[in-house]
Image: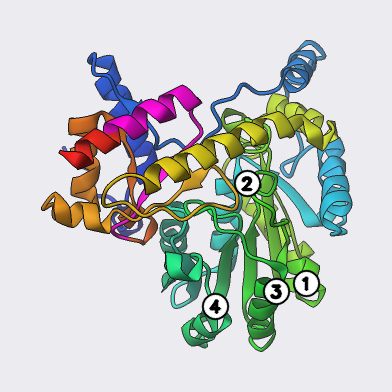
C-alpha cells in the first residue's frame, strides 16, 4: 500500500548536503576510501567547559520540560550577547530559543508567509531556504549573484525583485555556501531599498558571525539601519562558533508579535529545545568569546591552503572566502573539459574517480560551482586537493 502524500511534501527535495554526506558514509562503510568535504559542521569537539556544563546539568536534574521559548538564564545570556557584541537591545519577550537555526527559519516562514506571498532569496543560498518558503505556501524569488559581484546582491537587484507580494527578505552573512560577507556600506544600500517597502520583514541569518577569515568585520543590518528593528528578525546559534551542531540550539530576536507567534507554533511542534542542550548553550555564551579563536585560526589556515590549491588546479577558479568554512569555486571549465552534462554529473565523477565528495552548486541555486567545506583536518584537505588535481589532469 502506498499512502497519498500531501502536495506540500512532494514539492520539496531532501537536503543535498546531507545526501552527499550520507553517500560518502555509505561508501566508506563498504570499504571505499572517501574524503567527505560536503558536511557543514566543524570537525572540532565541543569545548570541554561546555561539555562539563551539560554533565553538571544532568547531575543537577535539569532533565524536564522547560518553557517553550527557552530557560530564563539562557535567554538573558542571549540578550547579553546581542547587546555586548552586536549593540542590539532586546527584552525577554523578543527572544526565542529553538531546536537549531533551521527551526527558527521554519517557524518564521510559517508564521509570516502564506499562499500568494513571495520571499526574496539571494543565490547562492543555503539549500533549505527555498524549500522552507515553499512549505509555508509562498514562492521563493531567487536573485542570482556571481563571483564577479562577490556573490552579493546589489540594491538595484533587490529593488527589481520586489513586488507587492514580497513579505520576506533572507540575508545570510557570512554566507553558506560562498563565504561572502556584506560590508556596512553594502548593507546600508540594501536598507535604503527596504525602507521604501514597509511590508517586508528581514531575516538576517548570522550563524557564521564569529568565523571570519580575513580583515573584514561582521556587521548586522540593524547596526547600519536601526530603524528597521520592528521588522527584522536576527537569527544566530551556538552550532558553528562552538562546534555544537548536534546539540541543536538556535535562537532568534525580533519584534514581540512575531516572536510570540513563533513561540505558539513551536509549542505545537517540538515544544522546548532539549533541556541539557540549553544548559550547554548557556555555558557557551557565558564563556569568553576567545574560546572559539583557536578553531577559527585553524579555519583560516585551512582556507588559505585550499583557496591557493584550488586556483592551482586546471579548469578551476576559486574566490577567497571572507567568513564561514566553505569555498565555492567555479568548475564550469572542468565540466566542459570532462564533457559532463552538469555539476551534478561532475560531483558523481569526482566521487567515483577521486573519492572526494563535494556538493554541486546547483543545490545552492548556482549551477557550475561546487561547495567545498574545509572543516576537515589539513592532512585530509591536502589529500583531497591531490586527488582532485589528478582527476582533472586526467
| Tag 1 residue | 224
Question: Where does the image place residue 102, in percent across and percent down from the top left?
Answer: 55, 47
Query: Residue at 35% across / 34% down in the picture?
Result: 385
Specify the segment rendered in magenta.
367-387
Q: Quarter-wise, where is residue 155 in the image?
A: bottom right
179 versus 114 height, above or below? above
- Give the side of residue 64 with respect to residue 45, left or right: right
Q: CA distance from mark 3 to mark 4?
A: 11 Å
182 versus 153 height, above or below? above
| Tag 2 residue | 213
Q: CA distance from mark 1 to mark 3?
A: 8 Å
Question: Where does the image place residue 386, in percent across and percent down from the top left?
Answer: 32, 31
The quadrant of the image that shows the N terminus is top left
Q: CA distance from mark 1 to mark 2?
A: 22 Å
Q: How many neighbours does mark 3 have within 10 angstroms: few (below 14), some (14-19), or many (20 or more)?
A: few
Q: Quarter-wise, where is residue 295 in the image?
A: top right
User: Which label is found at residue 185?
Assistant: 3
Which residue is situated farthest in the front direction here?
312
Query: Residue at 70% across / 58% down in the picture?
Result: 234
Amino acid at each position: 500500500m502506498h499512502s497519498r502524500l500531501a502536495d506540500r511534501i512532494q514539492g520539496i527535495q531532501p537536503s543535498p548536503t546531507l545526501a552527499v554526506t550520507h553517500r560518502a558514509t555509505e561508501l566508506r562503510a563498504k570499504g571505499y576510501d572517501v574524503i567527505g568535504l560536503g558536511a557543514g559542521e566543524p570537525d572540532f569537539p565541543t569545548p570541554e567547559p561546555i561539555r562539563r556544563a551539560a554533565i553538571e546539568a544532568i547531575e543537577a536534574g535539569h532533565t524536564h520540560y522547560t518553557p517553550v521559548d527557552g530557560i530564563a538564564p539562557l535567554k538573558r545570556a542571549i540578550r547579553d550577547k546581542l547587546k555586548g557584541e552586536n549593540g542590539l537591545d532586546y527584552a525577554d519577550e523578543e527572544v526565542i530559543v529553538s531546536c537549531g537555526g533551521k527551526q527558527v527559519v521554519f517557524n518564521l516562514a510559517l508564521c509570516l508567509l502564506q499562499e500568494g506571498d513571495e520571499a526574496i532569496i539571494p543565490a547562492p543560498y543555503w539549500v533549505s531556504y527555498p524549500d522552507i518558503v515553499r512549505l509555508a505556501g509562498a514562492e521563493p524569488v531567487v536573485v542570482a549573484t556571481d563571483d564577479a559581484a562577490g556573490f552579493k546582491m546589489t540594491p538595484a537587484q533587490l529593488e527589481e525583485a520586489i513586488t507587492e507580494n514580497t513579505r520576506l527578505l533572507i540575508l545570510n552573512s557570512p554566507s553558506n555556501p560562498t563565504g561572502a560577507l556584506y560590508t556596512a556600506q553594502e548593507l546600508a544600500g540594501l536598507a535604503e531599498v527596504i525602507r521604501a517597502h514597509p511590508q517586508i520583514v528581514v531575516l538576517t541569518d548570522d550563524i557564521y558571525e564569529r568565523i571570519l577569515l580575513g580583515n573584514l568585520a561582521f556587521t548586522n543590518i540593524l547596526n547600519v539601519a536601526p530603524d528597521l528593528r520592528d521588522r527584522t528578525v536576527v537569527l544566530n546559534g551556538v552550532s558553528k562558533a562552538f562546534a555544537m551542531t548536534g546539540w541543536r540550539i538556535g535562537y532568534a530576536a525580533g519584534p514581540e508579535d512575531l516572536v510570540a507567534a513563533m513561540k505558539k507554533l513551536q509549542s505545537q511542534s517540538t515544544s522546548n529545545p532539549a533541556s541539557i542542550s540549553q544548559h550547554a548553550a548557556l555555558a557557551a555564551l557565558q564563556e569568553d568569546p576567545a574560546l572559539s579563536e583557536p578553531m577559527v585560526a585553524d579555519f583560516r589556515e585551512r582556507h588559505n591552503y585550499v583557496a591557493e590549491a584550488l586556483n592551482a588546479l586546471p579548469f578551476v577558479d576559486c574566490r577567497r572566502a571572507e567568513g564561514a568554512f566553505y569555498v565555492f569555486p567555479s568548475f564550469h571549465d572542468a565540466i566542459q573539459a570532462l564533457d559532463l552534462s552538469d555539476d551534478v554529473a561532475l560531483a558523481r565523477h569526482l566521487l567515483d574517480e577521486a573519492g572526494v565528495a563535494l556538493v554541486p552548486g546547483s543545490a545552492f541555486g548556482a549551477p557550475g560551482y561546487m561547495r567545498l567545506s574545509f572543516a576537515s583536518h589539513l592532512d585530509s584537505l591536502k589529500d583531497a586537493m591531490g586527488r582532485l588535481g589528478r582527476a582533472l589532469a586526467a
